[in-house]
Image (spheres, helix red, strand yellow):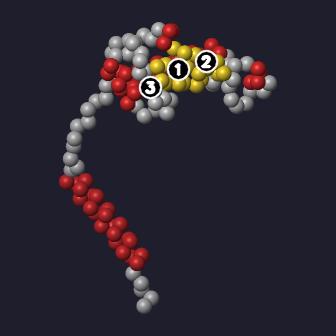
């Protein structure tokens, strides 16, 4: 697998106030990071990786092909920035893996028999529920 290097100019970082508990510090300091990376028009990605990343059904990817990562696990901007970049790299690394093609297989004769036997048993249980013995 070849390494993918993304230049700083393609990343857009915005620092915002984090949500959740944090006391008085949370109201004053913008420690959370919102990292944006335009997958659709990035020259750093080859076409195959780009198409795999855009084909993933991920709620972080917008309709325009921009991935938005919110990082607010840590109390400092630097650690949240590193966290967001690591998550972006993991996302891209997952997209650069080529899925192994699935081999079509057939169920064995024994597995067919087990399935049919369990269906017969279930049918007997349900038939027993509908029978009215009090008449």
Residue 16 image position (x, y, % from top left): 66, 21
Q: Earlier in the sequence, mark 2 or mark 1?
A: 2
2 or 3: tag closer to the N-terminus: 2
Placement of 28 over or under 3, stated as above or below: below
Label 3: few (<14), some or many (≥20) within 10 Å? some
- The residue most toward the right is 24
Instruction: State the residue lying farthest toward the bottom.
Output: 135
82 over 26 or under it: above or below: above
Closer-to-camera residue (59/87): 59
User: For the point 70% across and 31% down, which residue is it?
Assistant: 20
The residue tagged with tag 3: helix, strand or loop?
Answer: loop
**In front of the other: 110 or 126:** 126
Mark 3 = which residue?
A: 65
- Give the numbered dot on residue 115: none
In x, y percent, where is residue 32? Answer: 64, 21
Residue 74 in sight here: no
Could you give the CA–CA distance between mark 2 and mark 3, rounded to whole angstroms?
A: 18 Å
Check whether the beta carbons of the residues at disc 1 and disc 3 lie within 8 A of each other.
no
Mark positioned earlier in the residue sequence (1 or 3): 1
- Circle 2 residue: 14
Q: Quickly name the residue at label 1.
A: 36
**Contact? badges 2 and 1 (CB < 8 Å):** yes
Residue 13 percent across, percent down from the top left: 58, 16
Residue sitting at x 32%, y 62% = 118
Q: Left or right: 13 with respect to 65?
A: right
Q: Quadrant of the C terminus?
A: bottom left
């Amino acid at each position: 697998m070849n390494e993918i290097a993304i230049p700083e100019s393609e990343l857009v970082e915005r620092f915002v106030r984090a949500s959740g508990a944090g006391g008085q510090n949370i109201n004053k300091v913008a420690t959370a990071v919102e990292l944006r990376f335009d997958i659709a028009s990035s020259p750093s990605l080859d076409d195959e990786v780009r198409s795999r990343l855009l084909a993933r059904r991920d709620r972080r990817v917008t309709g325009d092909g921009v991935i938005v990562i919110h990082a607010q696990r840590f109390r400092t901007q630097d650690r949240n920035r590193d966290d967001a970049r690591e998550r972006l790299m993991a996302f891209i690394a997952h997209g650069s893996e080529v899925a192994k093609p699935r081999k079509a297989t057939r169920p064995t004769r024994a597995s067919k028999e087990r399935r049919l036997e369990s269906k017969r048993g279930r049918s007997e249980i349900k038939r027993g529920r509908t029978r009215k013995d009090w008449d």
